[in-house]
Amino acid sequence: MALIRHCPNVEIFIAERPLGSSFGPIMDSLARYASRHLHTIHLNTPGESISKIIWTLSALPRIVAAHIHIETDVSPTEEVAHLGSAADLQLRLPYLQQVSLRGYVGTLLEQLGGWELPSLRSFTIDSFATIQDPEDVVEFLRHHGINLVLLDLNLKTFVDVPLILELCPNLHTFTFNADWRITPHNDVASNIVRLPHQHITTIGLHGLCYAFGVGGRYDQATKNQSFEANYAARSNDLNMAALNKNNFPQLQRIRAVNKSMLEDLNESNGPSTENGGYNRWSRWWSACTNGGVRLEDCTGQLLGTLPEDNEGDDDSGEEIEDEEVEDSDEDEEDDSDEEYEDDEDQVDSYPLEDRNNWRTGNLLQVPEVLTQLIQEVKAMNETRDEALIARIIIPGSLPSP
């Protein structure tokens, strides 16, 4: 607390672990000494401390971004007792633009729905198996969805996607669980929108753990003869078919954002040909390419075209001075800016047949000038006369003994 008293200009406060009994005094110090400049807060608390979260936010009216992780759950019969008088607070947070919730956040989400958040633009909820009533998400968006430009829903339980997109007409980025079986559908594509959404440019996909036939979860489901893998993969196909420019006229990119799925793909060196994963990836790739949409991973790189390490290169003959690289980058920067901006809105121009092999190509390609320079350095190293070099005396230097 004394430390906070001496840091009146602190702008970001992060508590990665629950603060226990010191939570109240620390939050009180922040409100008293740092509230003028504090704009981002990241709190981690157990479920019984939700009321403390609410009181903290009420004492920080200038907050811009709030990231809250509720580690443990409380039973429905205990919710009212743990909220206490905080349940009746109607907060107004005029500057709050970003809310990120994780864990057992159902009770807090219900409270947020009744607050005044006129500046809210980004809402993320990562509560994969802990939301008991997904209707709380819909109710929250009924109150706050109109101004959102980013919505990220990492939930296991299905929520009404067409309704959500109708409640959030100004979204530019939308992320949802691709394993959801969105109904109705026509056995080809999900009816994902009621009317075409005019502003979404980026769609992110959680899930997809069973789509490519690799990974521990897929192996376990297959071993137990579970229908879950086939059901989820079929849902993936229906949802991917709906992600097109008929439903989203401004769509530019689709991103697979499940980190564990991407790690499984990397470890398996791509989708499984035996389990149908490679065929599915190829179909999705072709559909996106033909529709003018980039299929990407969570880093923004093309899904499946991963950078590879160069094999068999002699590092001793390829080292390039930092100054030379920087000069080359500066020379090419002005000429490449416009091309880069155009490329972001278009599918990569490589021929489709060059993409049909997983991990084909290197997204971190070396510019042609540098490639030529490296080749020349290699040739010089192979043909240089060591005896002649040893006899050369540089002015001002001593000859070698």
Image: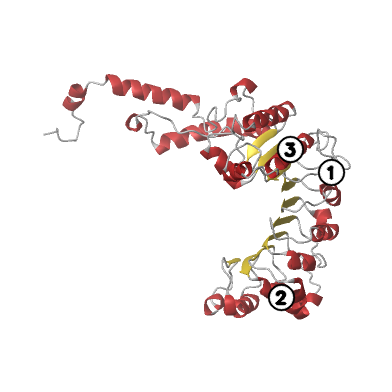
* In-image side of 306 versus 202 (left or right): left
**Gap in angstroms between the C-alphas marked 3 and 1:** 13 Å
**Which residue corresponds to mark 2?**
51
* Image depth: mark 3 or mark 2 in front: 3
Instruction: Choose the circle earlier in sequence order: 3 or 1.
Output: 1
Residue at 71 percent across and 31 percent down: it is 288
Mark 3: amino acid: Arg
**Front one among 163 and 66:** 163
* In-image side of 233 versus 275 (left or right): right
Which mark is drawn over residue 183?
1
Instruction: Choose the circle earlier in sequence order: 2 or 1.
Output: 2
* In-image side of 176 versus 46 (left or right): right
Mark 1: amino acid: Thr
Query: In this rendering, is residue 347 above or below 5?
Result: above
**Gap in angstroms between the C-alphas marked 2 and 1:** 37 Å
**Front one among 77 and 323:** 77
Label 3: which secondary element: helix
Measured as percent of width and height from the top left, residue 56 is found at: 68, 74
Q: Which class describes the residues within 10 Å of circle 1: few (<14), some (14-19), or many (20+)?
A: some
Measured as percent of width and height from the top left, residue 25 is found at: 60, 80
**Which residue corresponds to mark 3?**
234
* In-image side of 386 versus 50 (left or right): left
Mark 2: amino acid: Ser
Measured as percent of width and height from the top left, residue 349 is found at: 64, 25
**Gap in angstroms between the C-alphas marked 3 and 2:** 42 Å
* Image depth: mark 2 or mark 1 in front: 1
Label 1: which secondary element: loop
